[in-house]
Image (cartoon, grey):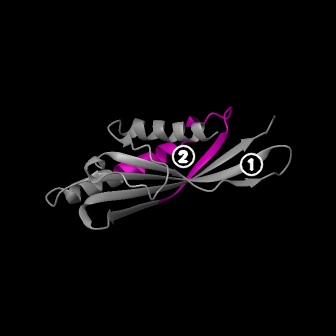
Amino acid sequence: MIEEIKDYFKSTVSLIDSDLSYDGLVFKNELTADHNLDYTYKMVLGTWDIIRPDTDIKATIPVDIIIYKVSNIDKIEDDFSSTYCKAIDITSLAMNQTRISQNGYIKGVVATDILPESILNNDNTLQFTLKFIVELAYKYKL
């Protein structure tokens, strides 16, 4: 299930910008080296929330995609705008219900926030956190 979620978001990001590369780190507090930040993103899966309304199990999991863009003082306004638009495109594509195969575990994706911010002690690196809630349904079989 986890791989299906990760693959879904990796393919979504890649469709919007194939130059963005996944840093492979799984926790928000793991830091990508500054010299590797440009055009990278981090994917952080949160707490699995489970309910069992009937014989199926339903769950939700928050997923954060954190995009980094290294800029400079001459280009920061343009880089901010283009990266923000890229973030909007990623959230829009991720929520496109026609991309979600109802044969898999993922049943829906909802974007909740796009948070632009600078990285502490680095005025020229942009960070955009895209927040999603992934809805899943499954039956557990041994």
Q: CA distance from mark 1 to mark 2?
A: 18 Å
Percent x, y of residue 28: 46, 57
Numbered badge on residue 95: 2
Q: Nearer the viewer, mark 1 or mark 2?
A: 1
Question: Is residue 14 one of those drawn in magenta?
Answer: no
> Which quarter of the rendered picture does the N terminus lie within?
top right
- Report x, y in % for residue 29: 45, 59
Task: Determine which of the numbered discs, if any, sits on residue 58 in the image.
Answer: 1
Q: Residues within 10 Å of mark 1 (few under 14, many from 20)?
A: some
Q: Quadrant of the C terminus?
A: top right
Using the rendered view, name the quadrant where residue 74 is placed: bottom left
Going 25% across and 64% down the picture, which residue do you hit? 122
Q: Amino acid at mark 1?
A: Lys
Q: Is residue 90 above or below residue 120?
A: above
Residue 73 locus on image (x, y percent): 16, 61
Q: Amino acid at mark 2?
A: Met
Give 67 or 80, whichever is nearer the viewer.
Answer: 67
Q: Is residue 119 above or below residue 54?
A: below
- Tell me what residue is drawn at x 41 percent, y 36 percent: 15
Q: Earlier in the sequence, mark 1 or mark 2?
A: 1
Secondary structure under tag 2 reads loop
- Residues shaded magenta: 85-113
Residue furthest to the right = 54
Q: Position of residue 68 (x, y in %)?
A: 33, 52
The answer to whether residue 9 is left or right of residue 66 is: right
